[in-house]
Image: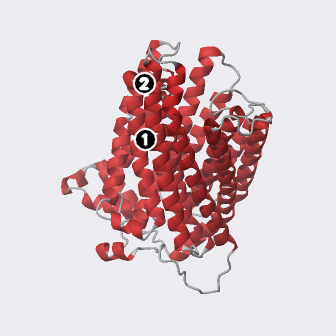
Amino acid sequence: MKNEAGQAARQPVAAEANPIYEDARRDTVQEHDHNRITLAQTQAWDASSRTPVLFGFVIALLWLMVGTWLGDISSFKFDWPDLLVSEAYLTFGRLRPAHLNVMVYGWASNAMFAVALWIMPRLCHTRLHWQRVALAGIAIWNMGVFMGVLLLLLGTSDGLEWLEFDRYSADPMMVAGALLVGMSVWKTLLARKVHHLYVSVWYVAASFPWFVIIFTAGNLPLYQGVESAAVNWFYAHNALGLWLTTINLGLIYYLMPKILGRPVYSYWLSLIGFWGLALFYALNGMHHLIGGPMPSWMIATSITASILMVIPVVAVGINQHMTVVGRFGAMRYSPALTLLVLAAMAYTAVSLQGIMTALVNINRVTHFTHWTIAHSHLGLYMFVTFSLFGGIYYILPKILQREWPSAALIRAHILLIVAGMVLYVVALGIGGVLQGLSLLDASQSFQASVEAAKPWLLTRSVAAVIITLGHIVFFMHVMWLLLMKTEPGARPASPFHAIIPVLVEDRTGAHEGKPS
């Protein structure tokens, strides 16, 4: 929590008369002075979360590989429509929603469980509480995901995007799983040994009640027709903003200052980002239904809330950029920092793109086109997945007490996924705009819009193959790390990972101000 101390030190002298400032200073500086952190304490907190964190990461990686293959086959079907059509479970209508659900609930959510269970003990200065409850939660969650995917491939679907899993069998298990993991997180929070809460705690702790509320609301079998569409997009948009976004922003806010060895640029900007997201994001979903049979006030409210999102997005963007500025050279030493910086940049980009897409004139062109797929992958992959990859690169060596075995595999993984995703997003973005313009041109047939997108869809499939190669490299590298044996007392040989990179150590002289 020294970063708050660093912020306090930058405040003007006149501010010290402010009782709010005095309270914050007392909560941070004085509290931290009484809670000096030792390496043994940090290792003890990591050890308390080791089992559920490893469990979450390993299951997440298995789902990542499953979801990757489902996505690849779905993409290839745009280029070769007759590919694998002999069996119903291999048709596009089942594979595509299975891909989406596996990546969101199988890969990302399991990795986020692990991140949350690792980060809370460190920021609360206590061991992970109710470890077995968290383990049971992850297991039950994955039983629900497996049941949902199996039924989906067999033809049972609720028919709502992001909510295709069967609401009577799979979804209750997922709610129970999230509740149990959330109980462990909150029990650890309530047993904390520090008074002041770093912003990552706000993001991580809030994610669990938010997810349970929106997921339960989205699955209630009470809505039909237009109401059902409205609730569907209330859930789908908030699943991104109040679940996938929050834990990953918490992870970036924790690891970025820690790896760089400097405090976050502004603690107050980080709070503006959190409360702005909490206030405005929940109303955004209806902009997906612009042009639909919805009440005009509902659409107008959603567009207004979408535009207001510029406040927290800019606050987070400035904060994260100013934290890194001048230290970009440290990315050469830390794959975790490289991926976290790219993820932070993608968060800003996808958020501003989403605000722009909510405007009626732009939405008219991009809606119902491949632009939307490019936009979602910019958020779900270049922000969420890059952030989780960065977290795994940092957390696994801490948990396992040994270093990554191959710097070459790390470089190969990062190069493949970055190159693949840039190609993916650019290709579908261009193809989507051309498709939309063709659809709006009354003189052109629908077939013309298909032909306009066709070369860009083939480029997307090439990008998908590149990304798959990156996932295979990463999966093999993680398995190597998990199964390798190290000699007692052996020093890690990898040049990538260091607690304080040499470059940063030279410029700062110390790691004062890092989050604990």
Residue 308 figure quarter: top left
Residue 159 pos. (x, y %)? 69, 26
Question: SS class of the residue under badge 2?
Answer: helix
Query: Measuring 59% from the left and 15% from the top, which residue is drawn there?
Result: 226
365 and 497: which one is in front? Answer: 365
Dot 2: few (<14), some (14–19), or many (≥20) neighbours within 10 Å? Answer: some
Please give left or right for residue 187 compared with residue 289 in the image: right
Residue ID for mark 2 = 437
Residue type marked 1: Val
Above or below residue 323? Residue 351 is above
Q: Amino acid type of disc 2?
A: Leu
Report the residue at 43% width, 65% height from top. Answer: 258
Give the side of residue 158 with respect to residue 209, left or right. Answer: right
First in sequence: mark 2 vs mark 1: 1
x, y percentage for residue 393? 54, 65
Task: Between residue 364 and residue 181, name the one nearer to us.
Answer: 364
The answer to whether residue 43 is seen in the rendering is yes
The residue where tag 1 is placed is: 350
